Image: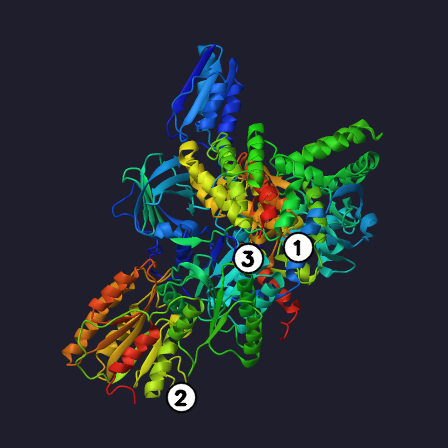
Amino acid sequence: MSDLLRDEPRVVSAGVDLFAAALAAQAVPVTTVDWRPPVAGTEDDLARVLADPRRPAANEQALAAMLAAGADLVDVRPAGEVLGLQPGQFLHAGPPITWERASGPLRGALIGAALFEGLAATPSAAEALLASGDGVEWAPCHDRGGVGPMAGVVSPSMWLFELVDDAGGRTAWCSLNEGLGTVLRYGAYGPPVIDRLRWMSSVLGPLLQAAVRRRGRVDVKGIVAQMVQMGDEGHNRNRAGTLMLLRDLLPSLVDSGAPSAQVAAVAEFVGGNDHFFLNLVMPAGKLQTAAAADLPGCSVVTTMARNGTDFGIQVSGTGRQWFTAPANTPAGLYLGAYGPDDANPDIGDSAITETMGLGGFAMAAAPAIVRFVGGSVPDALATSRLMYEITVGENPAYAIPILEFRGAPTGIDVTLVTRTGVLPQINTGIAGRIAGTGQVGAGLVQPPMECFTSALSALAATAPPPALE
Amino acid sequence: MIRHVEVRAGAYHDSVTLMQVSQAVQGEDGVEGALVAMATELNLDLLGGMGFEVPAASPNDLVIGVTADDDAALGRALARVETALAARPSDSGGGFGAAAAPRTVGSAARRDGGTVAFVSTPGRYAFADAMDALQHGLHVVVFSDNVPVEQEVRLKQEAGDRGLLVMGPDCGTAVVGGVGFGFANVVRPGPVGVVAASGTGAQQLLSLLDGAGVGISHCLGVGGRDLSAAVGGASTLAALDLLADDDATEVVVVVSKPPAPEVADAVRERAEKLGKPVVLALLGPGLPDLTDVAETVVTTAGAEWQPPRSWPSTAPATGRYPYIRGLYAGGTLCDEAMLLVSAAFGPVRSNIALEPAWALGPGLEAEGHTFIDFGDDTLTRGRPHPMIDNSLRIERLLAEARDPSCGVVLLDVVLGHGAHPDPAAELAPAIVRARNVAGARGRDLAVVVALVGTADDPQGLEDQARALRESGASVHLSDAAAARAAIALVDGGPE
Amino acid sequence: MPAPTVPTGVRATRPWPGDVSRQVLPGAASTAVAALVGGPRLAGEVVAATRTMTAVLVDHGTGPVLLCLTGPAAVRLPCAVVTPWPVSGLRPGQRALVGEGELRIGDDADGAVVTVGRWWRMRPAVIGDVALARRRTAGQEDSPGLDGSVVAAAGRLGLALLCGDDDEIADAVAGLLGLGPGLTPAGDDVLAGALVVGAAVGPRAAARLAAAVEAADPLRRTTAVSAGLLPYAARGLAVPQLTTYLAALGATRGDAGGAERKLLAVGHTSGAALRLGARVALAALAGAAR
């Protein structure tokens, strides 16, 4: 803090430019804020939240906890074992949703999971079962401490990565990545999809388990830190991360005693899927953001997730309450003959990567993919820089080389989003609208502002009334 | 072995550069010794000690001495001198392209290490910006008005907890060190520290002190409501503490309307323990005006008081002058003039009336002695402040010229940072026009100007005064004197 | 309040009419030179120009006075007019006009106009508890990076201040003036440090030293910048790093260590030489304090 009457002033000016110019004319260093009014109708809630005396310390604590959180891969096990998930129980991406409101890709993934679990023999039987709700139920992955990409559907027989954060004493999980194209998480459920899931449960899962147990923990946070230096942003590009994981696991995989043909198949599957590591970045993000959760007065966003119909966020100071609004449809580039009409609204828990400061927030680190999502390199730099305006701090563990190794923008603050009107930028895959289609493209998307304004209102309601003099 | 000596006249370099250059040259192959230094006598002796023939040179010259094995080595050495002297530190722009402008006060503060925030955003939003500043460790000047009082209380509580000062809300003027914030006059450095709950009141006081040759250490604005019961004088007390510890401040002045009684006690108590003379200048009916206050401060500071300058009108007073119409930009100046006019003639109608019964209707129709504060919140919504934009006042001036009941127009012209760059250029022609309009109707319209400013203000005090006088107005550096001049013109003088 | 619609350039900067080649920028003057800048116009000359600083010597009638234009990042000299960015491209020998609130350097083709829009307060050094400051500096090791000859000459100055006559002080001063490389040779910095301490603790001894320095004709013996800074030092005016260091030394709870690190970071050896001069003067003059 400066000594007001002794130190030379350095002024920050917000509002009327004339006064900033008058200061500059006095040879005073002035930084002019590119100020604009907050999102319409938020000023009273903003005043109440910013007046909350708990907020500064809570946000500081949230940032410190997020930066301290580690992420080690400790085991690979079936969901039934990890979560006690019973037949007929499913988990999915995003906020809670009914069958009636569920999008095509989510319905498709649930149908595929029901087929995979043997709950129905045909897609139409599965659909009827799910629509009837008879003996089946589903809940958000986030509510069970985990995350799933795109539809994010998890059933008891699917295998999960299990990660721990020793600093916070928490665990998180994520499914194994199926690869690109026609896959369950994009809502496809044809026979090749189900066959692949069977192979993943019978070969991929057990072999990864053997390798991890034989080798010991894998420092996922360490790999994420390196991948950001190698051109991955951890959401739409995970190539370096995937190869580093394979490098770390391969010796113990080879040494596990499994048949060499299976080892080769696993190595080929992992190495041939540039997104395999996404399913480890995501639970690392879940561990990081969970460390900031449930702090009274804290205005940091701990979850951004979509179910294909709604976009939902959670905020530290309001606990597990979801703030939802209809999800936007991403804008980007399409595969083959697909076009915007085929696109489903935004879907998946993978926005946890942006919530942790990667993905769209670390776009500057991944110039190689800017064209893939329909952008340019200057756009990528500008996007990452803009995200610092809505975050409470920087994560030195995830340093972005081209920004002079500035740490990734970390800790989205609902008050900063509503004050500036700047929305988080998310890099994402695009799922087909019709159940069973699969991936149709990739691009950029933003959450609906309403999620943030309603979270702000709820946070304002938790703020203590102003102390009476 | 070659010895090379050269002198470069007036070629200055700092000692770090010269040290690095000497080292770089000595590191060249075939170089025995090198000295690159400013040619002070002692350095020339050193050069002589190294076996060089000492050249004629002054201490402002650069001398280069190199001992090299051969011409090639000498060439390399001298080239090295050139490149080393020409080297510039690399530009650390921070990666590719320019960073986007900061969107919040906090972001700007983090980026450039700000120490003070100046917030002039609309009042309903200003709390967020000011709180952001405090929570990033910045003192804050809140120029914005219309900030709810409970938000003001909360801001000042936060500032108190953090050891920071909130100036405002509705702080029009502050001078910290030599830096003027908002509407501020350019004042000479000196011993008087001002705590002001009124922006234009502060400007009048600063200008009168400066005119009397008494300088200012700081002028800390606290906002018009600071001494109310709700706010409790939080910023006034904090500002007094700051000035108590400031070795440049020898005399302290507190300028405010009369505070709430319990707040007055707290301020008086703090003032008594300050260890420096404190002039409590409370403005109101029956109390000294700002010019009286300035006189008290000047004598307290040990200087000699002389009445502020004024220039009579170049036009003789020939007519009847029924009523005064005050067209003000500064609220406190308007208030001060109304108090004097009311003491002389009774009721004064106004949009900031002294008595509720004297309030003007929404149409601001003049009736008898009428004063309008064009800087009042209700008249600045959606348009610039009248210190920046003269158009409303000019419009009204011409309207008064057509009103047979208007005899004298009294207006303030405030100079300084932030104010209109040349107010007389707009007002003087308008005054001429207004007087012509009245003259065409067979009346003499007297115009009296209170000119608030210092000799160093960017607009140029003398130029402004001259232009206004030449338009036919009388010009007074004291608002109170201007008001009295207007009173004296009115028919029959004071009752 | 809505954004006003008037042009944003207030008149505090007054460019010369029709002048595009010249640099026109605002400045903030130290209170030590505010009167000079605000007074009647005087002629001067640029005596030094570096990347971060332009030094002007003004003929004040009673003798030349130094005034420096510096950028915001440069060391804050007591006679500085600080501009928001460094003035570039000026050359020694260019004519300067100082006064009426402006500095005008050079001509239309390549010059600069600095309009002084405000002042900043330059405070003389104050040492609260002189005995404490002396104790704290007593065991100090000789400043690293300083040439042996500088240290030895500083020692002679200390001895002369403690028990020498005017001739011995004059000899000591002569041995320091202009000693060392750079814009402010280390020997001059030692003298400046001693002068500042003298001004703060022992007016009489300080006056003797100041008289000896003046008699030695610094402008002939050392760089103009260095010579020009010595009169300010004799009034207790120095770079803030030295003032802060001396204040911390003399305060029971002062962070003398932190202040010392910041002082030593000034220039290449300037900070170390200032500290050496201050120590020598404290040792010699503290006993004679008020």
Q: Position of residue B155 (x, y in %)?
A: 57, 66
Q: Position of residue B436 (x, y in %)?
A: 17, 74
In this rendering, is residue A318 above or below A247?
below
- Which amino acid is tagged 3? Leu
Residue behind mark 3: B138
**Quick one: SS at disc 2?**
helix
Front residue of C288 and B491: C288
Residue behind mark 2: B357
**Quick one: SS at disc 1?**
helix
Q: Is residue C241 visible?
A: no
Residue behind mark 1: A60
Please tell me in which quadrant of the rendered image residue A326 appears.
Answer: bottom right
User: Mark 1: few, some, or many residues within 10 Å (few <14, many ≥20)?
Assistant: some
Q: Nearer the viewer, mark 2 or mark 3?
A: 3
User: Mark 3: few, some, or many residues within 10 Å (few <14, many ≥20)?
Assistant: many
User: Mark 2: few, some, or many residues within 10 Å (few <14, many ≥20)?
Assistant: few
| Discs 3 and 1 carry the same chain letter | no
| Discs 2 and 3 carry the same chain letter | yes
Front residue of A190 and A322: A322
Query: Mark 3 — on which chain does it sit?
Result: B
